[in-house]
Image (tube, grey):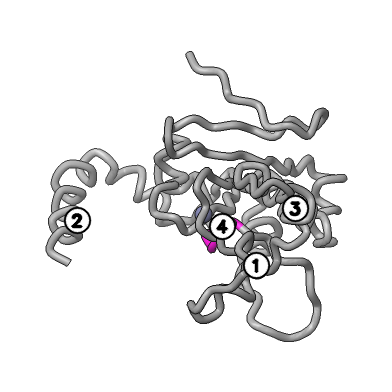
Amino acid sequence: MKTLLAGYRRFRKDIWPSDKAHFAELAKGQKPHTLIIACSDSRVDPAAIFGVRAGELFVIRNVASIVPPYETHGGYHGVSAAIAFAVLNLEVERIVVLGHEHCGGVATAMAEGHSSTPFLSQWVSLLQPAIHMGGHDHDHLAVEYESIRLSLQRLMTFPFIVERVANAGLQLIGAHFKITDGTLSVLDPQSQEFQLVEEE
Ligand SMILES: [Zn+2]
């Protein structure tokens, strides 16, 4: 906790004075432009990768950046609730599904979900269709890519997303971050391939 509180004190000393006005605006309400669905992995920080300030991203993080299928029966649909709030209440302009290299959740799913960690096997079993598509040669990168495509397809099982894509210009974007070299690839909607983002 010492480390966290030291970080907080740096935030108060170095960041807060210049960001005070920005936060005063944010206190009136949030208007994030983008919903990010990212992995819980500590090495993949959406705000750092996209260089944004507080208030720009509405972020859902879970193991392996999974979008569950649209379901109407009862249950604690935490991911779906956050998606609905971002799309319908905050009216985000785009949804980015951000997967990444060396994803432990994808690896667990590829190991047929046999994990002794409570809840984990069942959660990552949602990736089975992606393993079926990309996992023939135990190619983790291929399954990470397929998992992102699968989450984008599952977003389109939510009726309110279909409606916003058709009528409000809501964009659905897939992206993959490489931890090894810090590069980002984005899914090309035409070719359905991931393409490295050009740098300055
Ligand atoms: Zn991951």
Residue under the point 61% across and 70% down: 113
Q: Is residue 55 left or right of residue 110?
A: left
Q: Is residue 68 left or right of residue 22?
A: right
Give me the C-alpha separation between circle 4 and circle 1.
9 Å
- Of the residues shown, which amino acid type is indicated by label 1? Glu
Residue under the point 75% across and 44% down: 170
Q: Position of residue 177 (x, y in %)?
A: 52, 39
Give me the C-alpha separation between circle 3 and circle 2.
38 Å
Q: Callout 1: few (<14), some (14-19), or many (20+) C-alpha neighbours within 10 Å?
A: some
Q: Ligand 1: does it lie within 8 Å of the C-beta at label 4?
A: no
27 lies above or below 14: below
Residue where numbered disc 1 is placed: 112
Element under disc 4: helix
Q: Earlier in the sequence, mark 4 or mark 1?
A: 4
Q: Position of residue 198 (x, y in %)?
A: 56, 18
Element under disc 2: helix
For the magenta stretch, what is the residue range? 61-65
Q: Earlier in the sequence, mark 1 or mark 3?
A: 1
Q: Earlier in the sequence, mark 3 or mark 2?
A: 2
Element under disc 3: helix
Q: Earlier in the sequence, mark 4 or mark 3?
A: 4
Instruction: Say the numbered circle drawn on residue 150.
Output: 3
**Contact check, label 2 and label 4, Cβ < 8 Å:** no
- Of the residues shown, which amino acid type is indicated by label 3? Leu
Residue where numbered disc 4 is placed: 107
Q: Is residue 14 magenta?
A: no
Q: Is residue 63 magenta?
A: yes
Residue under the point 35% across and 49% down: 23
- Of the residues shown, which amino acid type is indicated by label 4? Ala
Q: Nearer the viewer, residue 100 or 89?
A: 100
Residue 197 quadrant:
top right
